[in-house]
Image: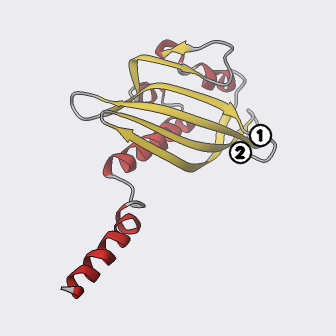
């Protein structure tokens, strides 16, 4: 009997370590969609980029003084492309994903370097991003809300 109690105690103590740090399938799927988001930005593939967004999206990008809907989701990109700039490189720092039912919030930092029309790299920029995703009836995910802001002086 003591052996069974000991095994149960060990199992209960190890459960959070074994199961609490493993990202869920949905969290991994959402992260892959966030990575696709940046691949589409770098490729200037606005058609695929727009598929990530729900028709009822409302968000507040750092480049806008007011919240915007889906009809303006590429505005922050065209600010760069109209000047001949391209996204030279990016690095994503995955922070937190929280899933509650059919809604999920994903947070991360993006380190970006834009290049001018001559290919000269500009200054690196770090932005903080939060996206709220909603699961669609077909099981896919779309961004329903989001916000971005520049990182502080320490890059946080």
Residue marked by disc 2: 156
Residue at x 38% of width, y 27% of height: 51
Residue 106 as seen in the image, left or right of residue 8: right
Residue 12 as seen in the image, left or right of residue 17: left
Residue 116 sits in quarter? top right
Label placed on residue 152:
1
Quarter the C terminus occupies? top right
Q: Nearer the viewer, residue 35 or 93?
A: 93
Above or below, 54 relative to 13: above
Residue at x 27% of width, y 28% of height: 136
Label placed on residue 63:
none
Q: Are marks 2 and 1 in contact (CB under 8 Å)?
A: yes
Above or below, 134 relative to 12: above
x and y, in percent, of residue 36 in the image: 45, 41
Residue 18 sits in quarter? bottom left
Within 10 angstroms of label 2, few (less than 14), some, or many (20 or more) residues? Answer: few
x and y, in percent, of residue 155 in the image: 74, 46
Residue at x 53% of width, y 39% of height: 38
Q: For numbered disc 2, what is the local secondary structure?
A: loop
x and y, in percent, of residue 46 in the image: 48, 26
Looking at this rendering, what residue extends furthest in the left direction?
Answer: 1
Q: Nearer the viewer, residue 32 or 152?
A: 152
């Amino acid at each position: 009997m003591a052996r069974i109690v000991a095994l149960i105690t060990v199992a209960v103590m190890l459960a959070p370590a074994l199961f609490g740090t493993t990202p869920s399938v949905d969290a991994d799927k959402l992260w892959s969609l966030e990575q696709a988001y940046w691949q589409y930005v770098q490729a200037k593939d606005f058609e695929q980029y727009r598929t990530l967004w729900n028709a009822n999206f409302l968000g507040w990008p750092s480049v806008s003084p007011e919240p915007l809907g889906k009809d303006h989701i590429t505005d922050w990109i065209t600010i760069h492309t109209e000047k001949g700039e391209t996204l030279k490189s990016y690095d994503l720092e995955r922070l937190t994903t929280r899933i509650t039912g059919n809604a999920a919030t994903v947070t991360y930092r993006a380190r970006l370097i834009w290049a001018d029309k001559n290919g000269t790299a500009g200054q690196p920029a770090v932005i903080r991003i939060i996206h709220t995703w909603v699961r669609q009836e077909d099981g896919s995910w779309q961004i329903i809300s989001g916000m971005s802001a520049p990182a502080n002086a320490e890059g946080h």
